[in-house]
Amino acid sequence: MSAATAGAVEAARRSALPRRALRSLPRLALAVVAGLVGLSVLLRAQNLAGPFWIDEGLSVGISSHAFTDIPGVLRQDGSPPLYYLLLHVWGAVFGHGVVTTHLLSLLFALLAIPAGLWAGWTLFGRRAGLMAAALFAVNPLLSAYAQEARMYSLLALLGLVSAAAFVRVFVHRDRRLLPLFVAALAAMLYTHNWATFFVLGALAALAVVALLTRRPRALALDALIGFGVPAVLYAPWLPTLLFQARHTGAPWASHPSAAALTRAPDLLLGGSQASIAVLLGAGAGLVQIASRRELSRDALAVVALLVIVIVGVCAAFVYSQLSLAWAARYLTVFLAPLLLAVALGLARARSLGIVAFALLVCICVARTSTAVSGDKSNIDQVRDAFGASLHPGDVVISTQPEQVPNLRYYLGGQFTYATPTGRVADDRVMDWRDAVKRLRAARVSRDLRPLIGRLSSGTEVLLVTPITHRRALRAPWTRLVRRRTVGWRRALAADPRLRPLGLLHLGGRRSSLVTVRATLYERR
């Protein structure tokens, strides 16, 4: 057989792999997906009833606005609207209870299991597909956000679809999935601002693919459609994004150190032990792929996936040195391409890969069982202690302004809510617009004393103040909140117009993200 004929046969065989995989997929997929979904539910449904913390209160508060008002409300917050719109619809159908709200995030995490099976199977074969599905079923980072009313499990799911479609379109040259890539990438951009770093990584990966295959012209049209159409779809949101960048940002964040960058793989994979298992098992498989004389589609795919992760994370790190934008949870956007590359490496490592895979799954299950907690806040205990004592028209003061929507969720909307920056106009959203400047300008004599003076006799005032961890005080916002907390606590305690009725100082749950203390006063 001539070399040309052999090459044609090999090309035909490879092009038929996705079709054969899809035909054989139902016979094994139902059993595998059912088992993995069951395991995932056991891991990820333990703390669905855990109380909301600050960010979850913001999610519910924003999504409780009218559907068409949500994009405008987000000018105060700093996020894109897709997750909040979906949560609004979900809440309209199932309610805004703690469990039902968490179930939406769990649903996105569970959908990543069959999506991972499809992606790995059609891209790299049956073993890689099964391993990818299992990794998405037990990944600790995804498990944490499967039980939280935030957009990160949705972001991971969309990242999985985007990464898989990217490989199919630009590496396997299967143009049928180009619409899927366009839709998933646009949805990512409307889910979280860090999707822009995923796009940068994907563009870098596209350039590498074009360079290695020496076919830039053949990729040009698909690249124009694949990245141009999402850009056009995202264009209506750009004015809001630019406004948010100028006026909101992330003042509660701090500039990341080099250690934050080096810890990124541990965070995504499930800890240092998981990273070692991946390095030994998947690393061996990737070495085998790279050692072949000819550039295979597997090699090109894994290079593209890793370029998306490395370039995207590094771009986010550099940007966060210039502007406060870094948060470890944002790295969820890069989870899917990394896990797909890991699944490929483990599948190609044969026996060593199977051993490393089993070890990795055990590590992830153990880490999820011990690390994920439902005690994310003690706001529910504030409600239990003082909720029955408050009456409509009473005042709730939070010296941590972003805590107000969560307080409103647990205490109700019949009270007047205030912060050191003044009375809150909309208690379902945190107004981050120039928040540091406004909080820095706040004064007890100008803002607090007139507020107390306007209250009638018998009105109760609930002061809620944060108990912050030392590591949180590195950010400018949290340092400023602490200073205002000390000043307002002293001022209310010394105000002769107020009589203390009760104090709740729990000291905080060990695993809490943010805990508070609360003091109830009565206007004399």
Image (tube, rainbow, N blue to C red):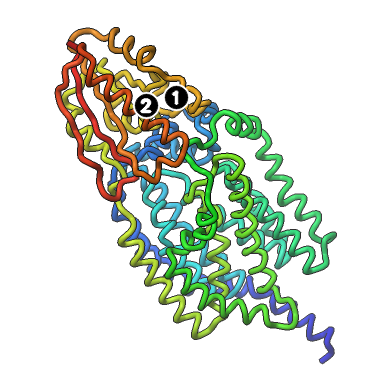
Hey, what amino acid is under mark 2? Arg
Relative to 140, is 414 on the left or the right?
Answer: left
Q: Quadrant of the N terminus?
A: bottom right
Q: Which mark is residue 247?
A: none
Q: Residues within 10 Å of mark 1 (few under 14, many from 20)?
A: many
Say if mark 2 contacts mark 1, CB within 8 Å.
Answer: yes
Q: Residue at x 33, y 21 (%)?
A: 417
Hey, what amino acid is under mark 1? Leu
Q: Nearer the viewer, residue 60 or 360?
A: 360
Q: Quadrant of the C terminus?
A: top left
* Residue 290 image position (x, y, % from top left): 67, 78
Q: Nearer the viewer, residue 298 or 448?
A: 448
Relative to 507, is 237 on the left or the right?
Answer: right
Using the rendered view, name the quadrant where residue 190 is placed: top right
Q: Outermost residue toward the bottom?
A: 1
Relative to 400, is 86 on the left or the right?
Answer: right
Q: Is residue 370 above or below residue 4?
A: above
First in sequence: mark 2 or mark 1?
1
Using the rendered view, name the quadrant where residue 513 is placed: top left
Number of dots carrying numbers: 2
* Residue 276 image position (x, y, % from top left): 47, 72
Q: Is residue 126 visible?
A: no
Label 2 vs label 1: CA separation?
Answer: 8 Å
Q: Which mark is residue 439?
A: 1
Q: Nearer the viewer, residue 159 or 378?
A: 378
Q: Residue at x 83, y 87 (%)?
A: 3
Q: Which mark is residue 484?
A: 2
* Residue 292 image position (x, y, % from top left): 70, 82
* Residue 110 image position (x, y, % from top left): 43, 57
Using the rendered view, name the quadrant where residue 297 is placed: bottom right
Q: Nearer the viewer, residue 272 or 146?
A: 272
